[in-house]
Image (cartoon, helix red, strand yellow):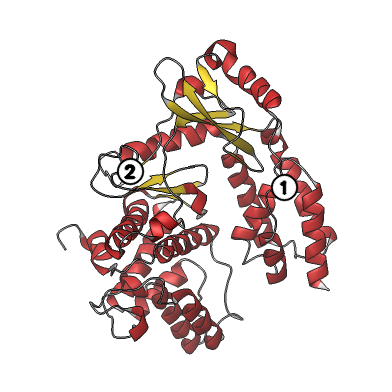
Amino acid sequence: MLSSQAQFLVDELGKLKGSVVKIGQVMALYGEHFLPDEVTEALHTLEDQTTSLGWASIEKELKAELGPSRLGELEVDPEPLGAASLGQVHRAKRKSDGLELVLKIQYPGVANAVDSDLNAVAQLLKIARLVSFGPEFKDWLGEVREMMHREVDYRLEARTTERFRQMLKEDPRFIVPRVLEEYSSARVIASTYEHGHSVSSEAVAQLSVERRSELGRAALELFFRELFEWGEIQTDPNFGNYRIRLAGEQGEDKAYDRIVLLDFGAVQKYSDEFLQPVIRMIRASYEGDLEQVIEGGVQLRFMSNDWPEDVLRRFGEVCMSVLEPLSRDRSQWPDYATNEQGQYRWKQSDLPSRVARQAARSAISRYFRVPPKEFVFLNRKLIGVYTFIAVLKAEFNGEDLLRRYLYGKDA
């Protein structure tokens, strides 16, 4: 019965326009603790059903946003580079110097429709009787609302992109596009076009394991910088937000491969009040201190001191297992998770499946509390980083990187 209700939800969402499809995708990505499994599974099948707008409509939007004079400085490719539920992307070239750009153009009316679209989705969930509208769900729905408003705030995204570009300007392993303010507006972001290969492309797969591992280490260290230094994290794990620029390719003058970072519309800022217990749990996991892992979980309010002691212990052990590739105690690593040099094999380790089985065996689900919304986004980011590294089939131990960020560069 529930599966048919879930399918009803997806079918009805597909009939709607505006930001509804994006809202459904966000719910699928972050709703595992609030929605039944069948609903999240059904929502994951929801594809971007928005066909790209024709050039005449896009040109009209560009003229309205930039004005004919500024738009006249650009030669815009009428064929979109890509299209999604909130907007589409076009390549462009500045006529005066040939600078290659990308224009991200928001569809008309999308920003103003976020609230009404989200209300429509909530109403569908209620009609289908798929969720209980308790305080926790309402809080989560409010977070989805905030996230959607951030997604359509192109001025905020432009500022965030530039901030990340400045924070990473001394690290040549990463490329962040430069935003061109003169061709940007509330509904248009103009940035430099940065070429590269998909993470899952054959060109990247053909790299040596050493090169792929260096890319994996870079991705892991970027996450550590976001978490330990900046307190703000790009939480969208979509592989479309990354490109790999290969050394020596297309005029590339660097002797190493680099990661191109795209789309900063889903950056979350975290308070010290949230980050400190998270870091406490990470440090305790690294040190093998189960009691401190549990204390951190209690402080984050998804464990409780009134749980049975064995449940707390098993929950803490699951949390510690998540950090297996970063731990200094390698005695529990399965043989197939390491190569002959003792380096962790991220793809072959099958860590996500093993952790899921461990959690299922521990029977902790009936005690599990809905984690803070911040933790949901952080967990998704961690899964995204692990998946990125696994797709690269990287082989390296993360212990030395984590140690430096826990105890200082000289540790």
Rendered location of residue 34, percent (x, y): 66, 65
Image coordinates for residue 262, horizontal then vertical, percent: 46, 43
Identify residue for label 1: 49
Q: Is residue 168 left or right of residue 30?
A: left
**Observer-nearest of 309 and 82:** 82
Judge whether 150 appears above or below 282 on screen.
Answer: above
In the rendered picture of this protein, how many numbered marks are placed on residues? 2
Asked if 188 appears above or below 138 in the picture, the reply is: above
Question: Which amino acid type is shown beneath numbered disc 1?
Answer: Gln
Q: Is residue 338 visible?
A: yes
Which mark sits nearer the N-terminus, 2 or 1? Answer: 1
Secondary structure state at the residue bearing disc 2: loop
In this view of the protein, which residue sits in the foreground, 113 or 241? Answer: 241
Mark 1 lies on a secondary structure that is: loop
Residue 278 in the image: above or below residue 96:
below
- Residue tagged 2: 249
Give x and y (percent) for residue 312. Answer: 47, 82
Q: Residues within 10 Å of mark 1 (few under 14, many from 20)?
A: some
What residue do we see at 44% from left, 67% from top?
A: 299
Q: Residue at x 70, y 69 (%)?
A: 36
Type of the residue with mark 2: Glu
Residue 273 at least partly seen: no
Quadrant location of the C terminus in the rendered image: bottom left
